[in-house]
Amino acid sequence: MEILGIDIGGSGIKGAPVETSTGAFLAERHRIPTPDGAKPADVARVVSKMVKHFTWQGPVGCCFPASIQHGVARTAANVDKSWIGTNAEVLFAEATGCPVRVINDADAAGLAEMRFGAGKGVRGVVLIVTIGTGLGTALFSDGVLVPNTELGHIEMNCRDAELQASDAARKREDLSWEAWARRFDQYLRMMKALLWPDLIILGGGASKKFDKFARYLTVDVPLVQAATLNDAGIIGAAMAAESLEF
């Protein structure tokens, strides 16, 4: 099925039409900078521009950095607080004239990774952790998504975990890969104690540097690098919209 996937991030909004049976892009990925403040109306205008760029008419899937419940944003950890309570699906549908499905960004990445990446065919409990501006999580049991886990916000050392162990924290505090990895390892050990995953897949921007920090991780769970990398959000967003009709 051909669906336009759009990945809404803190610095950029990326999109491409996707063949969801293969995960392949049907055109070159297009990126538009995220508007300052990332307020709902401004983001909706960029989503509309993305649809027009591809002269798209059909279903659209968007992934977004918030807990999404029946299309409504329930959190806003790294975007404007006015998103809380906003029906993102209605907002984007009105802006584009297309049917739209909106899903949490880490959940989208997880869907892509479980169908086309390192999680393909894996049974049991699989945890995907996306390492970027925050720490996103997607949890699967025998291939079935448990949505909106948001485990990057669990308390660690009396503070929000992602404030200490995200890639943004590494850059903000100018940490070496080793120093940062010891924090991230603590986070992963907490995930093991809570969830007992059979596999942990590491995605997001920092996962491209897996070779720089993997040797410092001691958590006793199989760890692998995500295969779909920066394309995961677009692919997973498109997959989430497969049930839409146009």
Image (cartoon, rainbow, N blue to C red):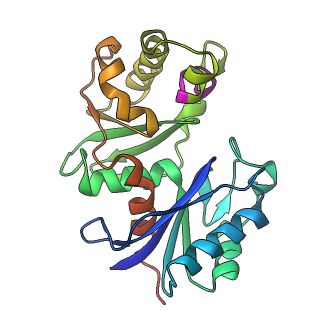
- The mark tally for this picture is 0
Please tell me which residue lies in front, 79 or 115.
Answer: 79
Could you tell whether 47 is left or right of 218 in the image? right
Q: Is residue 26 above or below residue 83?
A: below
- Residue 246 percent coordinates (x, y): 48, 90
Residue 115 can be seen in this image: yes
- Residue 165 percent coordinates (x, y): 54, 22
Pick out the residue farthest to the left: 121
- Residue 97 percent coordinates (x, y): 63, 86
Magenta region: 162-167
Q: Is residue 21 part of the magenta span, yes or no?
A: no
Residue ID at (58%, 15%): 174
Residue ID at (48%, 47%): 106
Q: Is residue 135 above or below residue 70?
A: above
Residue ID at (25%, 41%): 124
Q: Is residue 164 part of the magenta span, yes or no?
A: yes
Could you tell whether 149 is left or right of 129 in the image? right
Main SS of the magenta part reads helix
Q: Dividing the picture into quarters, in which one does residue 48 lie?
A: bottom right
Q: Is residue 42 above or below residue 246?
A: above
Please tell me which residue lies in front, 83 or 10.
Answer: 10
- Residue 231 percent coordinates (x, y): 39, 54
Residue 146 can be seen in this image: no
